[in-house]
Amino acid sequence: MNLFVRFGFMAMLLCAAMLCGCSKVYMPPVQVEGVHPDYGERLRVLTKQYVIIDDNVTLVEDEQQSNRKLQLQLVRDTAGVVVVFEMRKSKDNSLIWVYRHIAYDPNEFIPIVSRVSKEKIR
């Protein structure tokens, strides 16, 4: 019985540590330049879906509750649409990382978002 209690206590501590260790990320509306706003909303929804899969990141609705801010941009280019992801610190808005990729077709958003969520957003 004593071993069971110890195991339960350790499991609770591990869960609490995991919850506290989660990064809280705020995602403002997508900035679009020369692109239909529906594409921005599609990118935002896809990004939310992929980020939610990662257990180390929690999306929050208020920037005041976040550690970091993930800003997405779509910019029309002669070859296609430039998809830009910027991760910034919420406190001072300093840049942590930037990822840019050209999408020649809106269907290319999925592999771009998948790659960024696996490699960058943590």
Image: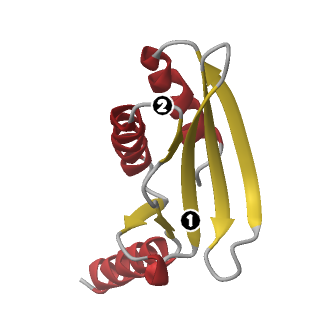
The image quadrant of residue 8 is: bottom left
Which residue lies at the image location 58% right of the left edge and 31% below the top edge?
115
Residue that label 2 marks: 35
The local secondary structure at tag 2 comes to loop
CA gap between label 2 and label 1 equals 22 Å
Work out whether residue 9 or residue 52 is closer to the camera in this orientation and state it.
52
In front: mark 2 or mark 1?
2
Q: Amino acid at mark 1?
A: Lys
* Residue 35 screen position, x and y as percent: 48, 31
54 lies above or below 11: above
Identify the image quadrant of the C terminus: bottom right
**Going by the image, does 113 lie left or right of 116?**
left
- Judging from the image, what secondary structure is the residue with disc 1 in? strand
- Give amino acid for label 2: Val
x 59%, y 69%: residue = 68
Q: Which mark is residue 69?
A: 1
Of 80 and 47, nearer the camera is 80
- Residue 73 x, y percent position in the rendering: 56, 44
**Other-residue count near label 2 (Cα within 10 Å), few / some / many at <14 / 14–19 / ≥20:** some
**Is residue 86 positioned above or below 67 on the image?**
above
* Residue at (75, 53) in percent of width and height: 97
Q: Looking at the picture, does residue 57 appear above or below residue 45?
A: below
